[in-house]
Amino acid sequence: MNLFDVYPLYPITPVKALDCIITDDKGIEYLDLYSGHGVISIGHTQPDYVAKVKAQLDNLSFYSNAIQNPLQVELAEKLGKASGLTDFSLFLCSSGAEANENALKVASFHTKKSRVIAFDNSFHGRTSAAVAVTDNKKIVAPLNAQQAVTFLPLNQIDLVEAELKKGDVCAVIIEPIQGVGGLDQGTTEFFQALEKVCKANDVVLILDEVQSGFGRSGKFFAHQFHNIKPDIICMAKGMGNGFPIGGILIAPHFEASYGLLGTTFGGSHLACAASIAVLDIIERDHLMENAAKVEAYFLEAIKVIPEIIKVKGRGLMLGVEFDFDVNALRKKMIIEKHIFTGGSNNKNLLRILPPLTITTAAIDTFIVALQESLAELK
Ligand code: PLP
């Protein structure tokens, strides 16, 4: 049987990884500055994480959500502490798209409305109940038979307010830092105004922190830089350090009822053990502080490269923008310099999303390799 060919593949076969280093089947080592779309938060095969997951696998990996699972309670308590959102509730699922789907479902039930507002170049997943943008082309996707999405430009609060006033909108969904779209962000003024107009019009404000959450920005959630409190927060990628887990944090004014949401795999014993280990290690090893420290170092050090026209993003969710398509540059960095970086819908942007354990020495290695690659491509 063939694989359904939907991914263009680099000719590299990783077989082993430790912290920020990936080793391929020929023994070649690569510096990982992409973390598989920001999934690896505490470093590959972090030994305490591996021990915790293995121990859980030896005991019980899964049982259904109809039976008490103390690991879910422990994860919720630790998430409340890490995020400061102790009065929110946690619903667990298995991926980013599923988190957003459930967030939109809660919003729709709560408001008894269906239309959704999202933003140009946003990316919220690929299921039928989410919003997608490919090649900068908007897909105004029907969420399901009843739901539709309206896309608006970022930072234009008057346009949002005009849509909300029509009275049929259940939710506004927004990434604090756009990931796939290319690291654009709303301003603090925009986020604060958004919170206000959503409240005034009884519309649910959903922050999609699937990529930016779990410490990647230098705060636990990237929206916390704007001093706002959303109604629902969606999480996934960095949550399990490679173990599939997602979730939504739901503000206290939403009422739960039996059957409102459900999932088979979400919140399994194994997934919870993985995510608890991630939270413990982020706290113990001060990885959010490291994200902020390495970001500051990166912003200063990268100034030696005059070809860069803009540095975008925050924390360890960064991008460097050039005035040319970076496809060949990225390929050279991977194949010849053995450094993984990422692309985005902005073809001129090289994305940097390393594990939160990354060192300033690794940033130096990246900058030298980038200088060499740019010179060699001239
Ligand atoms: N939301 C954001 C902001 C994302 O970046 C992604 C994936 O890239 C998703 C949602 C979808 O997550 P998943 O691929 O786990 O369904």
Image: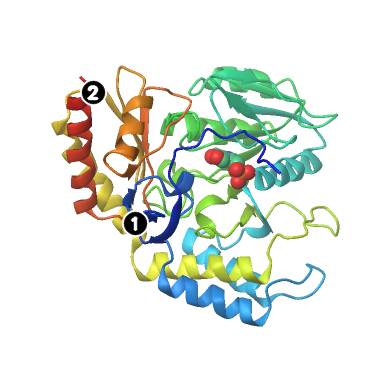
The residue at which mark 1 appears reads as 27
Residue 323, quarter of the rendered image: top left
157 relative position to 128: left or right: left
Give how far across and how far down residue 266 sits, in percent. 70, 59
Residue 141, quarter of the rendered image: top right
CB under 8 Å between discs 1 and 2: no
Ligand 1 found in image quarter: top right
Tell me if the residue at label 1 has its CB under 8 Å from ligand 1. no
Category of crowding for the residue at label 1, using alpha-carbon neighbours closer than 10 angstroms: few (below 14), some (14–19), many (at least 20): few
Label 2 secondary element: helix
Question: In whole angstroms, how far apart are the C-alphas of marks 1 and 2?
Answer: 27 Å
The residue at which mark 2 appears reads as 377
Where 194 sits versus 266, above or below?
above
Label 1 secondary element: loop
> Is residue 212 among the parts visible in the rendering?
no
Where 321 sits versus 129, above or below?
above
Q: Residue at x 47, y 54 (%)?
A: 214
Name the amino acid, label 2: Leu
Residue 165, quarter of the rendered image: top right
> Is residue 63 among the parts visible in the rendering?
yes
153 relative position to 361: left or right: right
Where 101 sits versus 28, above or below?
above
Q: Residue at x 40, y 60 (%)?
A: 17
Give how far across and how far down residue 91 sits, in percent. 69, 58
Identify the image quadrant of the C terminus: top left
Q: Looking at the picture, tell me which residue is in the foreground, 7 or 321.
A: 7
Give how far across and how far down residue 294 sits, in percent. 26, 50
110 relative position to 324: left or right: right
Q: Residue at x 23, y 47 (%)?
A: 363
Give how far across and how far down residue 269 sits, in percent. 66, 71
